[in-house]
Image (tube, rainbow, N blue to C red):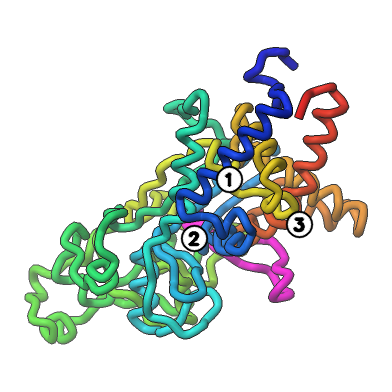
Amino acid sequence: MSDSSDDCIDSSTDEQRKRKREEFEFEMKNDGDSDLVNGENSQSIDEEFASASIHCRNRIQGRFTAVWAQINDVSVIPCLHSFDKECLVSWWAEHSTCPTCKSRSTSAKLAFQLKSIITRLNKRRKNEVILPVIHSNDEIFPARLSGHRNGNEDEDLSNVLNDDDDDDVDTNEASQLLWPCFTCSPGNPTGYVCPNPILPPNIAEIQAVGLDPATTVAPERHQRKLALTDPSAIGRCGNYVPNAIPNQIRCGCLNIYLGSNCDGIFCSNVDPDGCPGDAELPFMSPHTFSNHFPFGIKNNIEEVARYQDYVQGRPLTAGNILSALFDVKQEQTREDLNDAEANRLWGQGTWYCSICVTNVLSTTLFDWWKKERKNSLDRGDKF
């Protein structure tokens, strides 16, 4: 390892580390995050990172095909579970609960907490990390799923949650009718054979909504469609992803809470042409990963500073670290069970959704950090 200050984990003196720790605590308190320093609100920060958007992990030749992470912008009150604004609007159209914990709620607030921390840490970087135009497979995919619109971070929440008319969403009049999805067509590119395909609206149905059957055409891929109401027919995705989609594109992780496979769907594998809603996938800089502190050190300001310096001072991405974490899980399973089970659960070609990936982060990140810390100390690096 190079002896340069940029490559060292922390070559500062005790006095410098003390000053850094005081500056870190001062910043947290002055940004209204004193509860974070005291550990009283640490769970909500983890929940900010652990979103319900779909993640995917494909370990073909030991590399990531895609990992989706999400920085949510709306927190449900009072539980503080966080979601994309449009997802929450869709949920509250039919429910009056939090989508995650099911506690009764129909109010939310903008989730400034995690975003402010990320912004603050980004400003503290000595050198801004700029990802290349052509991204390698082990780099992290997006900070956010925009869906049909990006929205405005400063937009009044009351307007967002009560806005039924999205002017920037491409629609046509036929969107009020139920149309077949691409998986209804025989010989569709997914290989899926729909047992009960959706039929196009008939003349009477078209006329019932005041349209001319001679000129009415189905919405295009990027246009909004009427949502299906039969939960046995589709998954949560409004793009009509069928529940009976082939297993090889589902999340294969054993969900410890449900005692069965998670079965999350990776949308891009269902639709080879990409997301019909034209979801944008902005990339997240590697520094963002340093905000998800290992649970064992999140209340230790000095250790948090060391961890930040380590992550920010190296070309690490969430993909790099997640790959190491899944290797740890595979090795643990091999020791506890056998090679076949370890390969089935954690080996190449396995897929994992956001919740499963977050579980891996929560349960193994501290073990990874301790291993990295020990290896650095063995090399004579300074902390």
Residue type highlighted by circle 2 = Ser
- Left or right: 239 as drawn, with respect to 174: right
Residue name at image x 44 percent, y 60 percent: 187
Q: State which quadrant residue 174 falls in.
A: bottom left
The residue stretch that appears in magenta = 251-269
Residue in front for this viewpoint, 198 or 74: 74
| Mark 1, residue position | 25
Q: Which numbered disc, 3 or 2, marks the residue that appears first in the sequence?
A: 2
Q: Which residue is tagged 2? A: 53
Question: Does residue 266 appear anywhere in the picture?
Answer: yes
SS label for mark 2: loop
Circle 3: residue type: Leu
First along the sequence among labels 3 and 1:
1
Q: Residue at x 44, y 66 (%)?
A: 75
Q: Position of residue 78 (x, y in %)?
A: 47, 76
Secondary structure state at the residue bearing disc 3: helix
Give the residue displayed 52% in from the left and 48% down from the top.
Answer: 28
| Labels 1, 2: front one | 1
Circle 3: is it few (<14), some (14-19), or many (20+) Cα within 10 Å?
A: some
